[in-house]
Image (spheres, rainbow, N blue to C red):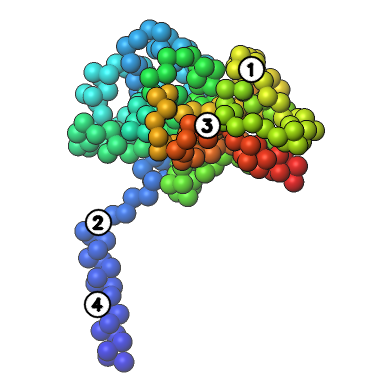
Amino acid sequence: MKKIVLTFVLLVACVLTLGAQAKIYTKKMKVADFTEKTLKVVLCGSEMTDGPFKSEVINHWKLSPYEFCTQEEFHALKTDPNYYFMFIVGKNDELDHLEVVKGTKNPGDDLGKMLSVVSLPIRATGDRGIRYLAYLGAYLDFFQTFISDAMVNDIIGYSGLSRKALNARAAHESAFCIADCDLAAQPLSEEIKAKMKQSGVRVVSEDDATEAMLNASPSTLVSYCIRPVNTPKNKYYYTFLIGADDHKLYYCHKQYYVKDENAGFTPSAIKNLLWKINN
């Protein structure tokens, strides 16, 4: 009996000692103050990019107070946990990510050491096209939904936005627009084409897909594929299906590839999508 009591006392003492030494902060706790803090939207200094970015933030961001800032202001404030920051940044996957981070002590020059709240590729690094701007408002909207959920649920916070994407089954009565530029360079069989037609899945031009997003076409999911522009080997690409009117992320798939012709919505991916829509 004395041995049991002694073991219990030692266990309690150990727990109390550990508690005094360190506290475990979950991601939910770390971002719980998001709506109370100011979000600094970091501009790059190019009016061609900053103008549309500012416009979309003004039109869509409702979750927290925000201010626009320069790169210099960001580097001066990035160690202050009283601020959150949002920016578009290139990463070593040769893709530019839209990312929200929290001010973090001693990150140095490595942004990867800052607490990342949410991040998702939005364009290829070096891509001078403006197609991504048609999707920027949707990104801002589903970022806000994700952050709101992460504030109260650690599982969501740590699993990431891609894990929270709705299943295509949730939109089985919607129309699906797959831009031809988002298809992998592999021919679709006549059987797949017939099933696509029956399921309301259309292959459209890039312009038509962009127009559907910009016009918020009702009950329509629009594709978006992001892949490195320099056709490197052994890289990742992302394929998305985004609600044009509700700005929800219905499909998010990250895929490793070696051959360039495999980057995009492949016949097998289309076949899997059709199965989800119809089951």
Sequence order check, earlier mark of 2 and 3: 2
The amino acid marked with disc number 3 is Glu
The amino acid marked with disc number 4 is Leu
Report which residue position mark 4 lands on. 10
The amino acid marked with disc number 1 is Ser
* Residue toward you, 168 or 106: 168
Sequence order check, earlier mark of 4 and 3: 4
The reply to whether discs 4 and 3 touch (Cβ–Cβ < 8 Å) is no
Report which residue position mark 2 lands on. 22
* Residue toward you, 128 or 43: 128
Sequence order check, earlier mark of 1 and 2: 2
User: Mark 2 to mark 4: distance in Å?
Assistant: 18 Å
Query: Would residue 269 appear left or right of 85 to someone viewing this image?
Result: right
Q: Disc 1 or disc 2, which is closer to the eye?
A: 1
Residue situated furthest bottom in the rendering: 1
Q: Disc 1 or disc 3, which is closer to the eye?
A: 3
Name the image quarter holding residue 71: top left
Sequence order check, earlier mark of 2 and 4: 4
Point out the image quarter for the N terminus.
bottom left
Instruction: Give the secondary structure at mark 3.
Output: helix
Instruction: Give the secondary structure at mark 2.
Output: loop
Instruction: Give the secondary structure at mark 4.
Output: helix
The mark found on residue 205 in the picture is 1
Report which residue position mark 3 lands on. 261
Sequence order check, earlier mark of 1 and 3: 1
* Residue toward you, 183 or 57: 183
User: Mark 1 to mark 4: distance in Å?
Assistant: 70 Å
